[in-house]
Every structure is written in structure tokens, then in C-alpha cells.
């Protein structure tokens, strides 16, 4: 595909070992590639979630971390996080804290997820900047637990919330 995004192919420890197109990473070979996630809290402890577009190939119509995106070939994890946060939710000033990096596998892909959290600056209002997101909204912990129980979130968000977010 012309102008297709090129992603780094990485080892389980995050070392870049090759480059491949997005479609190849998401194809039958399921090449391991890095992504970034940001969990953004407001001052009241509510968590911003995005509702994935119904046109997405993976997990359409499910609530997910505020930001999630691929790391481009030659881009650092930190630069990818800054770019994705700006593109997806219009936030340019934040202080990320690394939570965990883990391998996530599904029938269509293998990702090395680099998971961060941050607190939104005073006065930040969520705004959708990209066509891949239907809605952005802050949720209380009780509302999130209800969404997870009803199967309304992506599987990796539910896992991240249970293991790394709920206690933070």
C-alpha cells in the first residue's frame, strides 16, 4: 500500500529488529510492534476514556484508554506518546509517568504496550481531534467498573485498569 505507515518490529524487550508496514504487523504474521497508551485523570480522580469509532477494525464501539497509538519507525516511545496525545485528545502539556510495558496478543496483532498515566492540567476540556474516536468522557471508578462488567471496554483496557490503574 502506498504511503502506508511504517512501524518498528521489536523484540519482547523493545529492541528494534526490523521495520514493516502496518498491514504486515496486523496481518497473519502478527509482527510484534510497540504502541503507547495514556490514562489521563482529572483533579477529581476521574479517568478519561475514548469511545472507539464504529469504523475501527479492532474493538469498534468499545471504551478504551484516553490515548492509544502506534510508535512510528525511528520514533522514540516518549515522542510517540507526545504526538499521539496531541493528535487524539488535543493535549500538549502533561507529565507522563510510566506504569508498565507488557506484551498484548490478540487474533489480529501482537503489541508491546507502553502504558503511562498523567493528570490533566487545570481547565483541560477533552476534545476529539481525530476521526477514530466517537466520544471522550471522564468516568468515575464505579462507572468504569460497571463498563468493564458489561463488556463495554477493550480487553487490554480492562486488564490495565484492574492491574495498574485501580490501585493508583
Image: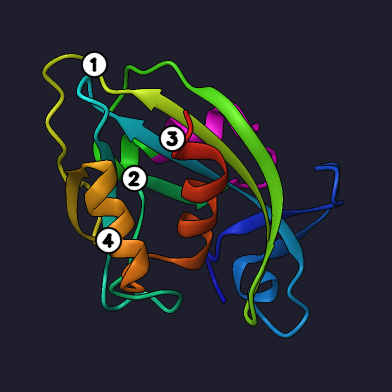
Q: Which mark is residue 83?
A: 3
Q: Earlier in the sequence, mark 4 or mark 3?
A: 3
Q: Earlier in the sequence, mark 1 or mark 2?
A: 2
27 relative to 159 in the view: left or right: right
Q: Earlier in the sequence, mark 1 or mark 4?
A: 1
Q: Earlier in the sequence, mark 3 or mark 2?
A: 2
Instruction: Please name the residue that numbered disc 1 is placed on.
Output: 121
Instruction: Please name the residue that numbered disc 4 is placed on.
Output: 146
- Percent x, y for residue 19? 77, 57
The stretch of residues the image draws in magenta is 71-84
Which of the two marks, 2 or 4, is nearer to us in this view?
A: 4
Under circle 2, the secondary element is loop
Q: Earlier in the sequence, mark 1 or mark 3?
A: 3
Instruction: Please name the residue that numbered disc 2 is placed on.
Output: 66
Q: Residues within 10 Å of mark 2 (few under 14, many from 20)?
A: many
- Percent x, y for residue 149? 35, 68
Q: Is residue 75 visible?
A: no
Amino acid at each position: 500500500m502506498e504511503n502506508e505507515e511504517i512501524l518498528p518490529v521489536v523484540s519482547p524487550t523493545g529492541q528494534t529488529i526490523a521495520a514493516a508496514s502496518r498491514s504486515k504487523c496486523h496481518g497473519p504474521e502478527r509482527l510484534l510492534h510497540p504502541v503507547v497508551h495514556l490514562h489521563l485523570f482529572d483533579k477529581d480522580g476521574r479517568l478519561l476514556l475514548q469511545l472507539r469509532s464504529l469504523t475501527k477494525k479492532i474493538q469498534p464501539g468499545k471504551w478504551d484508554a484516553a490515548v492509544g497509538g502506534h510508535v512510528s519507525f525511528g520514533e522514540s516511545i516518549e515522542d510517540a506518546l507526545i504526538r499521539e496525545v496531541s493528535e487524539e485528545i488535543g493535549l500538549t502539556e502533561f507529565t507522563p509517568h510510566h506504569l508498565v510495558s507488557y506484551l498484548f496478543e490478540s487474533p489480529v496483532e501482537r503489541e508491546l504496550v507502553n502504558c503511562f498515566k498523567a493528570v490533566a492540567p487545570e481547565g483541560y476540556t477533552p476534545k476529539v481531534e481525530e476521526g477514530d474516536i466517537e466520544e471522550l468522557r471522564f468516568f468515575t471508578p464505579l462507572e468504569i467498573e460497571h463498563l468493564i462488567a458489561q463488556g463495554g471496554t477493550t480487553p487490554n483496557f480492562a486488564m490495565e485498569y484492574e492491574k495498574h490503574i485501580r490501585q493508583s
